[in-house]
Structure formats: C-alpha cells, structure tokens
Amino acid sequence: RRELRADGAIANDYSEDLRGVPTIYLGVKGCLYLTIWSRGNPQAGGPMDSEIHSSNAVWIGSPVWRLLQALNTLVDRDQRPAIDGIWDDVVPPTKTDIAMVNALAKRFDPDAWLKEERTAKFKYDRPKDKLLRTYLFEPTVNICGIYSGYIDHGGTKTVLPHEAYAKIDIRLVKDMTVDGTLRKLKAHLKQRGFGDLRIDVHGPYAEIWPSSGGTMPAFAFDEYLKLPWVSTGLGHGSRAHAPNEYASIEGMKRFMAGEASLVYAAARRGPKRGR
C-alpha cells in the first residue's frame, strides 16, 4: 500500500452522451460471470459422447432442453432474477442515493438512452426515477450466449446434441458476494433436479456499491488502497461490446484534452499531506 499511496483514483472513459453531457459514476456493480454446461450423463440421460440422429429424441433425453429448462427457472416473467434467496442480500438505496436519483431523473432522457442503445423500449413501464433505481440498485441475470449442436446458417442436419452451454453474467449490488451468489445458484438448480449441470466461473469481481449498470474492478482502490474513486471522461462513445462499438473523433480529442487537464490540475494541487 505504501508504494501505491495517492490522493484518489479515476477510471477514464468516454462518458459524454449524444447531447455532449459528461457522466460521473461514483461506483459500479460487481459481476459473476459463468458458463453453465448441460451434458448427457447416466443420471439425466441423453447422448454422452457425441451427437446422435434426432429420430432418437422420441425416447432419448436432450441436454439442450435440460439447459433451457434450467435457465428458465433463473428469472421470472419480467426477466427479474428468481434464484432462490438472491434478493435476501440486496440492500435498498439510502436516502442519499434516492436524493441523487431524483435529481438525476429530472435530466434523464429515456428516449435518448433508448436511441443510443438502438432499443425500442424498456422492460418496465415506470417513471424515470423508478427506472433509474431499477438500473442502479437491482441485480440482473443475463444470458450472453447459448451454443449447442448444428448451428450452420445455410444447411440442415437432424441431430440430437450431446451437450449445450450458456454464458451467463449476474450483476451484483451492495452486500451481494460472488461466493454467496454462486452457492445460491447451485442450490437453486439442485433443488429443481439440475444438480448435474456443470458451472464454470470466470474472473469474478468483488461487489461494489452500484451507481452504474456496468462492471470494473474498482473495488481494489477503495477496499485495498482506501482511495476515493470516480469514473468519468470527456468525449462520446457508445454501443459498448457490440460489433460496431465506436468513439467519435472529436470526442477522442476532448478526452485527451480532458485527461491532460486533469493531470496538470492534480500536479498543481500537489499531494495531500499525512498519507
């Protein structure tokens, strides 16, 4: 820690929206990222070594359908998390959080957000403050992708696959932990007869007080280095993680200028004493 002493920490990113308004995030959510595998086995049935002819589906179980049935239990009809006990650890927003959300709601433009994300509508028909509280302070269970069997776009092949897997991310909010959420997920699946499904965990992050729907390992600055932390930056970028993710040229210029100004301002201010 002594070698990493500092006055603060900042995660630099393109934070301007289409109106040119920068965003400052005071925190992020945590993330449990995993792969759930369904394979043919003596307990559940299904092909065990390779795909077989689909005519056998009349009397041989499908690992693909088992995976889909298991995934369907993880959310409710509104696609809110339905894992047993997952909401027990969710802490409601504080009075300060609610006040910040109410102030933000006065400026938040839902239509502009939807346009930037190229999406028709939100899942919920709620006032702006309720939408923001949902986005910032609730966990999610999301399917990033599903793979199994014959998926060629141009042909046909009738097979009963021997395995299927889904990539899942679970966003965590305050007081939720990776280990605790994983235990609840495994218990949830076992209780419903899906205990044979294999779960591989990828790069878990510790939980952080949420004020952004995204994820980054910002907890290290607060928990280990005891540093104040924010995420912001000039410039506009959007469609994150999509094939056509972008940052505007003018935004890049503002981003570089903003970062340079920040470094110079910090240098002029000098370090805090007593660290």
Image (spheres, grey):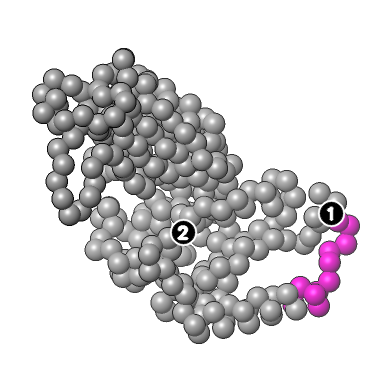
Task: Tell me the quarter of the image containing the C terminus.
Answer: bottom right
What range of the chain is rendered magenta?
265-275
Residue name at image x 32 percent, y 19 percent: 41
**Disc 2 designates what residue?**
101
- Position of residue 184 measured from the top left corner of the image (x, y, whole percent): 44, 27
Q: In this view, does 105 lie above or below 22?
A: above
Residue name at image x 34 percent, y 65 percent: 117
- Name the side, left or right, on which 200 lies relative to 51: right
User: What crowding class fits label 1: few (fewer than 14 Cα within 10 Å), some (14-19), or many (20 or more)?
Assistant: few
Q: Relative to the observer, which residue lies in front, 239 or 262?
A: 239
Instruction: Name which residue type carries label 1.
Output: Glu
- Position of residue 151 measured from the top left corner of the image (x, y, whole percent): 24, 46
- Name the side, left or right, on which 15 lies relative to 131: right
- Position of residue 15 measured from the top left corner of the image (x, y, whole percent): 51, 70
User: What crowding class fits label 2: few (fewer than 14 Cα within 10 Å), some (14-19), or many (20 or more)?
Assistant: many
Q: Can residue 268 be seen in this view?
A: yes
**Disc 1 designates what residue?**
3
